[in-house]
Image (cartoon, helix red, strand yellow):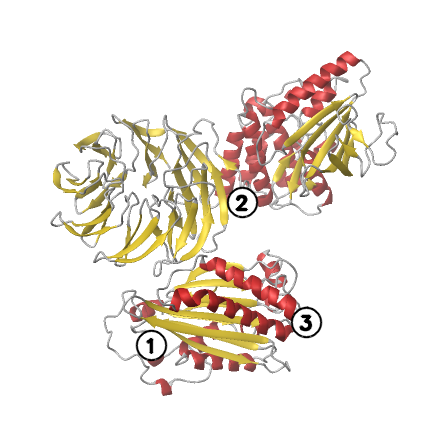
């Protein structure tokens, strides 16, 4: 299987620049989640989809759903992409944020809303001129510093605007093939590669995950642990909040998935992969992911952002 | 006055302070240290936790109070003298596992030693509480750290320091799970005047100590005894002396590896001659256990691993070749031959197997760079302003290319071109087929940084502090400006371009835009070039430190302190980092922990980088020699 994919996606870029990139038989693809291995036709679709595109651009899908058992939605989402392609430079970029307000806290939905808005406001302010301005100059601060400061401001916004409220926050700034990730809580960012690898980029700040890391409980026990959503780090809760900030490469060929525990805690990883790999485009994939979580009972709010760099 | 009456009391200042009277919370000692609580007491006196009121920020200290009951003032004065001398020695010690001594004071029958407060618990307490065996890995990590501190003490100059009372109650485990030795010999010096007290503790002390010997072997036995206690949970104080052989570890705790048992048993040999000769040797044996059992040794001294001036432990050179002047550059291994440039103007070709001279090629200037090999030829820059291309087989010239300044960077060959920076301020792209420049980029400042060429772009620094990205048409795509010169050579990883600057920063730069992804502050300027392995970046700096930094999070993983600047560039070979220092040593460190495996002393500063091939490390030194060492 891996070899087959290697053949399909050779590291050297395909010379077929002129081949249209719209999947030919998009309508034939199953719209529902499937866990069956991909058939030849689907694989060919994907190969087509990963042919070279000029200029490189980010393709995004988002999904946000209350689930079946909650009567409100405390998840919040922000997705923005831009493409600049001029004689001077070509740049696909995007800002993607998921926040999951904490159920046990009043103001949970306010906290996630504030987190997403203050983070996105800060990032767009700091990056607008350097990216899109006339005669742009790189920002003085490093991208990691900017992300860290954004998290700090989001934390302050919550302590002032939604006291008592708490939220997770996972924000990814994509520039070209480069990702800068800021993360607090148990929302996750995944790198999903077309060879079937599903790699968790973030580390949950949850007590159960910590117990698992320490070898006190197994991954299986963690998955069904009654306190699996207890966080030891969240925005709006305690001082100081220190985000995990790191740099990573956009999975190529593959996807960036950011999702709340209403998705990853419910739908197994191999199923995530198959849903994403078999969908004709990211927004369909997101709807299918939500459907899958609901089919598993939909115990929590479900939120997902799926990003693919096509170039 | 504080000096004559060290204790001032907020309340009840008129209380007598005879023996047996302890200080109380709120008392102030020496007009400075505010007592908070008693954290230990024994026959000799009391240990207090106190706050140092000289600092605005809360600094806690431990104060050890020793009370002598010697009536004779002359003897007491004498003892105070010994005590003072010992305090002075202790105050000079610097090791992660030894609490710092801040102050001492004697007053009548009392002596006070003010030292670093260690927030932790001693192993005796931990042992008393545990109901299950400790994991071997844990004990191994502690043991390695204990050997490290014993090695430091035993190698102390001019006199070795023998701890003499190694036992669990003298070993603290701090909040970071590292060991700290407490209760130094100082107390015994004070005590020994009173009666013929045996120094050491029954159960942990070896037979030779009862004969009054104080040698390194004494400490190693007591360490072995402490390890036996930790592994078996059998308190040797409750057993007959020297009876460890009757309590084989494997009978009590079947989980302990035979390798570990062998080390402990060797340390516990009845005769000192049969034990480890030095703490270094025992540490090496423990690291060997870690290697064989696949145990991860956590970097014990994350911030303080330090180069030791100890002789090159167990490392001998396979061969040495001497040139006529300093070697400041880096050798290249290719096809069984070692090529190295020298300040005697020659490029030498040596048989890598035995160091035998093959040929030399004379330029008209010093050679500071690293040769490159391409299609049977060797490329090397010289301070004679030329790029020389020499037949690798015969050593005869193929062609030379003139720049307008000394060439101090190293050539990089890619896409049919040799890319080389010169002090003339240009990066030259020289066609290897014609020997002529296809293009050159003017940067306005000398280029001593070696270009990294990747995917149609060349990345290089200059002395004006710029990092430039140029395409293969010679057009500058972006330039990033640091605050001081970039002499360091950039490398490209999956996420970023990494480069050091003389502004004391390690930068991660987005290869596409030239934007800074993160910055990492070094203690001082650097001209060392980073190297990358498994998301770990290694770079040296003028603050004598070799840093290991996570390339994704920009967090320090460990640091290693040499005795002088690290201006050469580290290399990674088979999970070890090799790096030379101006202190003359080539260090071999475990890549993930920074622990020193060995250090090899040359007779001059090392400014170049090593080369590695087939488990052999090659290094040139300003002592004019090239060394081949077993990795």
Location of residue B519 with respect to A106 vertically, above or below: above
Separation of disc 3 and disc 1 at Cα?
Answer: 43 Å
Location of residue B124 with respect to B278 vertically, above or below: below
Residue B47 percent across, percent down from the top left: 75, 33
- Do marks 3 and 2 share a subunit? no
Give the residue at mark 3: A104
Image quadrant occupied by the C terminus of chain A: bottom left
- The first of marks 3 and 1 along the sequence is 1
Residue A248 percent across, percent down from the top left: 43, 61
Residue B435 visible (yes or no):
yes
Residue B231 percent across, percent down from the top left: 63, 40
At numbered mark 3, what does the secondary structure look like: helix, strand or loop? loop
Image disc number at residue A49? 1
Q: Which label sits in the foreground, 3 or 2?
A: 3
Give the residue at mark 2: B298
Q: Which label sits in the foreground, 3 or 1?
A: 3
């Amino acid at each position: 299987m891996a070899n087959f994919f290697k053949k399909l996606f050779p590291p050297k870029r395909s010379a077929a620049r002129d081949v249209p990139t719209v999947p030919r038989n998009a309508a034939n693809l199953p719209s529902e989640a499937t866990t069956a291995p991909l058939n030849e036709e689907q694989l060919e679709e994907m190969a087509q989809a990963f042919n070279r595109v000029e200029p490189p651009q980010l393709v995004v899908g988002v999904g946000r759903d209350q689930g079946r058992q909650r009567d409100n939605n405390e998840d919040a989402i922000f997705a923005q992409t831009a493409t600049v392609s001029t004689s001077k430079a070509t740049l696909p970029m995007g800002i993607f944020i998921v926040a999951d307000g904490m159920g046990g806290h009043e103001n949970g939905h306010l906290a996630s809303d504030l987190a997403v808005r203050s983070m996105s406001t800060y990032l767009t302010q700091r990056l607008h001129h350097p990216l899109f301005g006339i005669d742009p100059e790189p920002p003085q601060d490093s991208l990691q510093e900017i992300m860290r400061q954004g998290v700090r401001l989001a934390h302050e916004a919550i302590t002032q605007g939604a006291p008592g409220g708490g939220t997770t926050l996972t924000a990814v700034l994509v520039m070209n093939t480069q990702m800068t990730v800021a993360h607090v809580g148990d929302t996750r960012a995944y790198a999903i590669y077309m060879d079937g690898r599903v790699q968790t980029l973030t580390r949950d700040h949850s007590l159960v995950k910590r117990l698992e890391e320490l070898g006190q409980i197994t991954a299986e026990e963690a998955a069904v642990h009654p306190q699996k959503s207890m966080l030891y780090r969240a925005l709006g809760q305690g001082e100081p909040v220190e985000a995990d900030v790191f740099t990573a490469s956009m999975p190529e060929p593959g996807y960036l998935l950011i999702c709340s525990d209403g998705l990853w805690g419910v739908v197994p990883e191999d199923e995530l992969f198959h849903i994403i790999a078999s969908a004709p485009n990211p927004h369909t994939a997101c709807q299918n992911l939500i459907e899958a979580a609901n089919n598993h009972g939909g115990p929590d709010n479900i939120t997902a952002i799926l990003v693919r760099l096509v170039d | 006055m504080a000096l004559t009456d060290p204790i001032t009391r907020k309340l009840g200042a008129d209380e007598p302070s005879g023996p047996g009277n302890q200080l109380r919370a709120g008392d102030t000692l020496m007009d400075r240290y505010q007592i908070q609580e008693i954290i230990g007491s024994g026959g000799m006196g009391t240990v207090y936790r106190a706050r140092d009121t000289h600092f605005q920020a809360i600094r806690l200290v431990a104060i050890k109070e020793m009370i002598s009951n010697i009536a004779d003032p002359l003897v007491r004065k004498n003892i105070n003298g010994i005590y003072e001398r010992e305090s002075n020695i202790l105050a000079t010690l610097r090791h992660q596992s030894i609490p710092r001594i801040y102050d001492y004071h004697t007053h009548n029958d009392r002596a006070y030693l003010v030292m670093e407060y260690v927030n932790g618990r001693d192993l005796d307490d931990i042992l008393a509480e545990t109901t299950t065996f400790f994991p071997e890995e844990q004990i191994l990590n502690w043991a390695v750290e204990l050997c490290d501190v014993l090695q430091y003490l035993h190698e102390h100059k001019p006199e070795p320091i023998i701890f003499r009372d190694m036992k669990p109650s003298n070993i603290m485990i701090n909040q970071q799970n590292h060991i700290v030795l407490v209760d130094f010999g100082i107390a015994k010096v004070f005590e020994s005047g009173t009666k013929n007290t045996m120094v050491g503790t029954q159960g942990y002390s070896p037979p030779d100590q009862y004969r009054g010997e104080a040698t390194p072997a004494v400490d190693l036995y007591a360490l072995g005894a402490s390890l036996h206690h930790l592994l078996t949970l059998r308190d040797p104080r409750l057993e007959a002396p020297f009876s460890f052989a009757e309590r084989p570890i494997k009978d009590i705790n079947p989980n302990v590896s035979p390798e570990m048992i062998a080390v402990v048993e060797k340390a516990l040999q009845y005769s000192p001659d049969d034990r480890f000769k030095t703490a270094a040797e025992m540490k090496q044996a423990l690291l060997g256990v870690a290697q064989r059992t696949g145990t991860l040794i956590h970097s014990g001294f994350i911030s303080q691993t330090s180069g030791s001036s100890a002789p090159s432990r167990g490392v001998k050179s396979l061969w040495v070749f001497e040139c006529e002047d300093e070697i400041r550059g880096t050798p290249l291994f290719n096809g069984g031959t070692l090529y190295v440039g020298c300040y005697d103007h020659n490029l030498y070709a040596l048989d890598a197997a035995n160091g035998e001279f093959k040929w030399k090629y004379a330029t008209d200037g010093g050679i500071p760079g690293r040769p490159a090999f391409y299609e049977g030829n060797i490329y090397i820059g010289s301070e004679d302003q030329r790029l020389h291309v020499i037949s690798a087989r015969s050593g005869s010239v193929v062609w030379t290319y003139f720049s307008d300044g000394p060439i101090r960077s190293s050539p990089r060959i890619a896409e049919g071109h040799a890319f080389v920076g010169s002090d003339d301020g240009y990066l030259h792209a020289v066609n290897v087929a014609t020997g002529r420049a296809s293009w050159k980029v003017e940067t306005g400042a000398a280029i001593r940084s070696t270009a990294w060429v990747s995917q149609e772009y060349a990345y290089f620094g200059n002395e004006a502090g710029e990092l430039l990205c140029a395409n293969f048409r010679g057009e500058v795509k972006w330039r990033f400006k640091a605050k001081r010169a970039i002499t360091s050579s950039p490398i490209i990883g999956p996420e970023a371009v990494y480069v050091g600057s003389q502004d004391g920063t390690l930068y991660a730069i987005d290869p596409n835009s030239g934007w800074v992804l993160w910055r990492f502050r070094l203690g001082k300027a650097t001209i060392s070039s980073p190297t990358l392995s498994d998301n770990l970046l290694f770079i040296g700096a003028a603050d004598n430190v070799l840093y290991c930094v996570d390339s994704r999070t920009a967090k320090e993983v460990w640091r290693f302190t040499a005795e002088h600047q690290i201006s050469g560039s580290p290399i990674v070979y088979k999970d070890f980092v090799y790096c030379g220092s101006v202190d003359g040593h080539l260090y071999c460190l475990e890549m993930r922990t920074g622990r020193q495996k060995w250090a090899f002393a040359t007779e001059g500063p090392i400014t170049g980088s090593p080369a590695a091939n087939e488990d052999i490390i090659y290094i040139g030194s300003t002592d004019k020699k090239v060394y081949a060492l077993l990795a």
